[in-house]
Amino acid sequence: MKVTLENVLPGEIEARSFEIITEELGGRKLDEDKAPVIKRVIHTSADFEYADTLCFSDGVIGKALEAIRCGASIVTDTQMGRSGINKRSLARYGGQVYCFMGDEDVARQARENGTTRAVAGVDKAASMEGPLIFAVGNAPTALVRLYELIKEGRIHPALVIGVPVGFVNVVQSKELIMATEVPYIVARGRKGGSNVAAAICNALLYMIDETRGQ
Amino acid sequence: MKVTLENVLPGEIEARSFEIITEELGGRKLDEDKAPVIKRVIHTSADFEYADTLCFSDGVIGKALEAIRCGASIVTDTQMGRSGINKRSLARYGGQVYCFMGDEDVARQARENGTTRAVAGVDKAASMEGPLIFAVGNAPTALVRLYELIKEGRIHPALVIGVPVGFVNVVQSKELIMATEVPYIVARGRKGGSNVAAAICNALLYMIDETRGQ
């Protein structure tokens, strides 16, 4: 067996990857503002299905960038998602990344309410000040709870990234979010993940970084 | 639009998900020892392609479980991968999870050698004592470096989990690992990710936990 490695310098791997993605998307027309998000999700998953399944509410990219510029913080439903987000880039605009899944009070609340820690984590986030972005890559129960709080007017997220992955209520939870008036980016269907959630956050961050020339 | 949520208790979501996966795999015959790994990867990705693309070296499951029981540590190439691995479960057998990507000496070494931090991280891991499992979910350069060190007899991993994702040298790096004599679990092709790497580690851990009745 002959394996031939492509000779690409470390600093050029990402750019070369995006070139390949663009090539393979072929003549497909992506909205200019959404393309960086779609391509970064494909970059992180090697899964071109996302070009079809990523759904964007009207004007969501502009709203999301504005929220980040105004210091929005990001709440994730996994430590993995938190790990994957470029926290240094977010901090430039004043935001932080929070994940409440390991918090003692969240675990206790979930036990008491017979619910998931993801739900208790959303309840905890609901009391936070300032613009909030929810990046849900794992728990459909978190999205369902967000839907309830949004409908009750108890939470007003600047953006909901709804990309949980899986088999139980995942598809439905995404449809619920898309039935609200909140700005959203959702991966319709079963696919998604903490890596996808982080990739979407990073794509947004890098769009701002680029316009700042960083 | 009518969205109907399935009524599943928090503690039963995972079991129900695995039921659905088993149903949808249909009559497909999976080797009994590999099935928990394949199903957990599908669980984490909602991507049934992995049933076809996951490749296992001869007897790898038994060897991997034995290595973990003997206190093997796991080296990942991303903090995300590290986050996703059940560290409490691994610690029961004496192992820890390491990720060197943020280390100052690794960054310096990478700069000096004009290589990636992932490569420098593998070089750092090569000097570690005890059985080692490499869980590579991101950087093909880490796999290529592992291949070189294995070929030079400078490293003897107990297991290489080779599941980087992407477009540049990803496919090739996996083929290189499969051409060695080391125990491996590889996701052939472009797909993979830190979440997949962590899922494979966790599947192995839970297989041991189960036989211990935990």
Image (spheres, coloured by chain):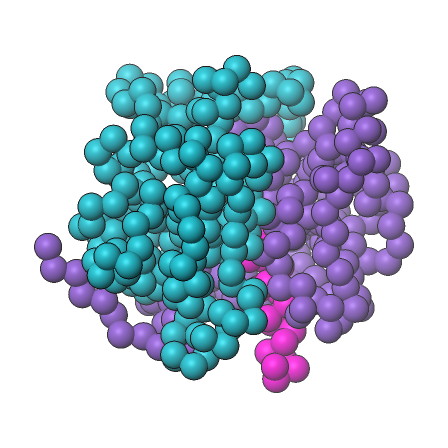
Chain colours: A cyan, B purple
Question: Which residue is at a point 67% across and 69% down the rendered structure image?
Answer: B88
Q: What quarter of the picture does the C terminus of chain B occupy?
A: bottom right
Question: Which residue is at a point 83% across and 22% down the rendered structure image?
Answer: B112
Does the magenta stretch mainly form a helix, a strand or a loop?
helix
| Residue B204 covered by magenta stretch | yes
Question: Which residue is at a point 27% across and 74% down the rendered structure image?
Answer: B7
Expressed as whole percent of the image width and height from the top left, the position of residue A58 reads: 21, 33
Question: Which residue is at a point 64% across and 34% down the rendered structure image?
Answer: B140
**Can residue A99 be seen in this snapshot?**
yes
Q: Is residue B120 left or right of residue A191?
A: right
Segment colored magenta? B193-214
Q: What quarter of the picture does the N terminus of chain B occupy?
A: bottom left
Q: Residue furthest bottom?
A: B213
Among the 4 quarters of the image, the one containing residue A201: top left
Expressed as whole percent of the image width and height from the top left, the position of residue B36 reads: 52, 66
Expressed as whole percent of the image width and height from the top left, the position of residue B202 reads: 59, 63
Compared with residue B89, is residue A15 higher up or lower down, i.e. above or below? above
Compared with residue A102, is residue B190 higher up or lower down, i.e. above or below? above
Q: How many marks?
A: 0
Among the 4 quarters of the image, the one containing residue B120: top right
